[in-house]
């Protein structure tokens, strides 16, 4: 399940992930990203990972369609709140692959630092 959050940054797509990510969840987030890009030109991403129990194949397909249509060039920063070591490892790899996006992990207790990171980007 994905829940949209308001973190007080106009061009932010902010979400909380808990459980399994569905196709509907992915469509919700990607539509919000499109809307924010149309309004602001570029976006920042805030992800709070409470728990993760997988992702539906249809959700992955939706994400690939979005990446093919829109790309990632209009994402400047991403902040991920997690205490999971495997997530930190993946974010470290993604940070190297997507060099124009500054990605950083924060512990769950560092939510305000993560928001400041996004504001100052």
Image (spheres, rainbow, N blue to C red):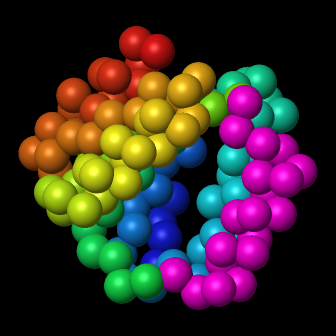
Give above or below for 20 relative to 101.
below
Residue 116, given in percent of the width and then of the height, sits at 31, 22
In this picture, residue 33 sits left or right of residue 90: right
Say which of 6 and 45 sits in front: 45
Say which of 81 and 4 sits in front: 81
Q: Quadrant of residue 7?
A: top left
In this picture, residue 44 sits left or right of residue 111: right
Task: Provide the residue span drawn in magenta.
Answer: 55-73
Please tell me which residue is depicted at 28% across the width and 52% down the height of the picture: 89
Residue 16, given in percent of the width and then of the height, sits at 39, 61
Residue 20, given in percent of the width and then of the height, sits at 44, 84
Q: Main secondary structure of the magenta part?
A: helix
Which residue appears farthest toward the top when viewing the image?
120
Please tell me which residue is depicted at 27% across the width and 41% down the height of the picture: 105
Please tell me which residue is depicted at 40% across the width and 12% down the height of the picture: 120
In this picture, residue 65 sits left or right of residue 19: right
Which residue appears farthest toward the left when viewing the image?
109
Q: Is residue 13 magenta?
A: no
Residue 40, given in percent of the width and then of the height, sits at 73, 25
């Amino acid at each position: 399940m994905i829940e949209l959050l308001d973190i007080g940054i106009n061009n932010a797509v902010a979400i909380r992930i808990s459980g399994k990510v569905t196709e509907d969840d992915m469509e919700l987030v990607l539509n919000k990203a499109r809307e924010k890009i149309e309004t602001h030109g570029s976006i920042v991403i805030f992800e709070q990972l409470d728990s993760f129990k997988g992702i539906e194949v249809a959700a992955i397909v939706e994400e690939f369609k979005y990446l093919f249509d829109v790309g990632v060039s209009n994402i400047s920063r991403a902040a991920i709140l997690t205490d999971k070591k495997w997530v930190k490892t993946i974010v470290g790899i993604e940070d190297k692959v997507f060099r124009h996006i500054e990605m950083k992990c924060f512990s769950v207790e560092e939510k305000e630092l993560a928001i400041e990171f996004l504001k100052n980007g």
